[in-house]
Image: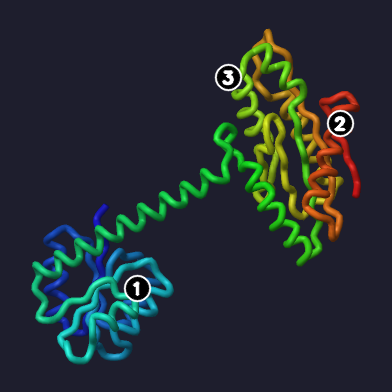
Amino acid sequence: MTARILIVDDDHAIRNSIQEFLTILDFKTYTAESAEKALSFLKTYHVDVIITDIIMNGMDGLEMTRVIKENYDTDIIVITGYTGDYSYEEAISKGADDFIFKPVRFEELLLRLKRVLRERALTQERTQMLERLKELAITDDLTKLYNSRHFYHQLENEINRYNRYQRPLSLLLIDVDHFKEFNDNYGHLEGDRVLYQIAKLITSCLRTMDTAYRYGGEEFTVILPETTCDAAMAVSERINEVVKNELFIEDDKKDMSVSVGVTEYLPGELVTEFVRRADKAMYMAKEGGRNRTSLLLP
């Protein structure tokens, strides 16, 4: 992808000569004759690198650099002809990524621009890698739902939100019925496929604000913010129906179902108490014959 470069200088000749040089080298270039116009440009358009003079009418290049670094993901090379007035350290402290002196030698400018772009690409690659690793740390590899570690973290957040706004908060604990028997009869690969399908079906029944998790083994949990127990029961029953009717199982294999426990958060209770009550509700559904939903109120 072609790098996008904004050249900021109140000297028309310098601005145009740098633009012509970089355009020949197939960079996508833009120009601005002042810091104010550059900042206005950035409100609408993204650029990878800004090449700017320091001394300009109005806001100078170093102050513009500080503002840009606080608000935009853009690298900056500053240019000055006043070696005694501005130091490399001062430019870097304002956020500049490199610093060169006038008169600008195009060969030096190109070398510094390539270095800044290379380091920018490496930084973006590292950021993407860290985000991917963070995602993997909270995701269940089989079902692609969040894992139990993230479940407890998010449940704490939702309880804190409940304490601030006093909005209802409900929890589902879902267990796949007779799953061990299914695994024993048809193998773990087939069992894994069923768990993946059930995870997708659970997610299909949820709103954007709701989140589903693989709690462990064949158990799933669902956090339902701003949801009363009555509304949570409706979600639970929809999940139960969808799993029963839409889970694909070959004809010679038994149908699958889930048992669901539903409860609502009680002000002041511990996370463990909240989860334990949902778990108890789920076992009530199991004991009541499976393939059903049970509600246990605080």
Q: Is residue 51 visible?
A: no
Disc number lying in front (3 or 1):
3
Q: Amino acid at mark 2?
A: Ala
Mark 3–mark 2 distance (CA, rounded to whole Å): 27 Å
**Circle 2 is placed at which residue position?**
285
Residue under the image location 57 percent in, 42 percent down: 139
Q: Which mark is residue 62?
A: none
Residue under the image location 66 percent in, 52 percent down: 153
With 256 as the anchor, is 127 left or right in this view?
left
**Circle 1 is placed at which residue position?**
41
**Circle 3 is placed at which residue position?**
189
Q: Amino acid at mark 3?
A: Leu
Q: Nearer the viewer, residue 134 or 245?
A: 134
Mark 2–mark 1 distance (CA, rounded to whole Å): 61 Å
Identity of the residue furthest to the top in this view: 252
Instruction: Please provide percent x and percent y for residue 167.
Output: 80, 60
